Image (cartoon, rainbow, N blue to C red):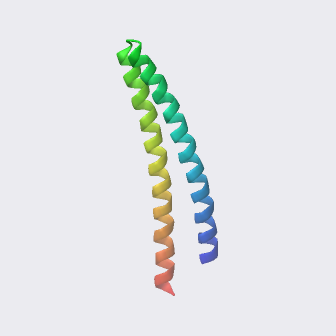
Amino acid sequence: MKLTIVQERLRQARRSFNLALIATALSACIGLVGAGLLLSGKVTEGTVTAAGGMAASVQCVQLAKDTNDRLDKILDELDDET
């Protein structure tokens, strides 16, 4: 049982890391578009674009953290039972 949880944790950690990396890259691109819009005088569009990119990145990182925390809790519970 512990081995299965450890394997699942590693699988999810890899995927979460990849997702967070992709989200960060997309957020940077969206931030650059937002900065371009701000510099071109379209303040409202730039602000919305930049904020949307940052929110997406934060959400992905939080999802990865929550997943790892849940698996750590399950592993701790199994350690307590043995």
The furthest residue to the front? 39
Q: Position of residue 59 (x, y in %)?
A: 45, 44
Q: Image quarter for residue 51? A: top left
The furthest residue to the bottom? 82
Q: Image quarter for residue 50? A: top left
Q: Is residue 19 above or below residue 82?
A: above
Q: Position of residue 25 (x, y in %)?
A: 54, 38
- For the question of whether residue 1 can be seen, the reply is no
Q: In the displayed structure, does residue 60 sit left or right of residue 3?
A: left
**Residue that appears at 39% across and 13% down:** 42
**Residue that appears at 35% across and 16% down:** 43
**Quadrant where the image shows the N terminus:** bottom right
Q: Is residue 78 above or below residue 60?
A: below
Q: In the displayed structure, does residue 77 sit left or right of residue 13?
A: left
Q: Position of residue 28 (x, y in %)?
A: 49, 34
Foreground residue among 4 and 23: 23
**Residue that appears at 48% across and 51% down:** 63
Q: Is residue 61 above or below residue 54?
A: below
- For the question of whether residue 66 can be seen, the reply is yes
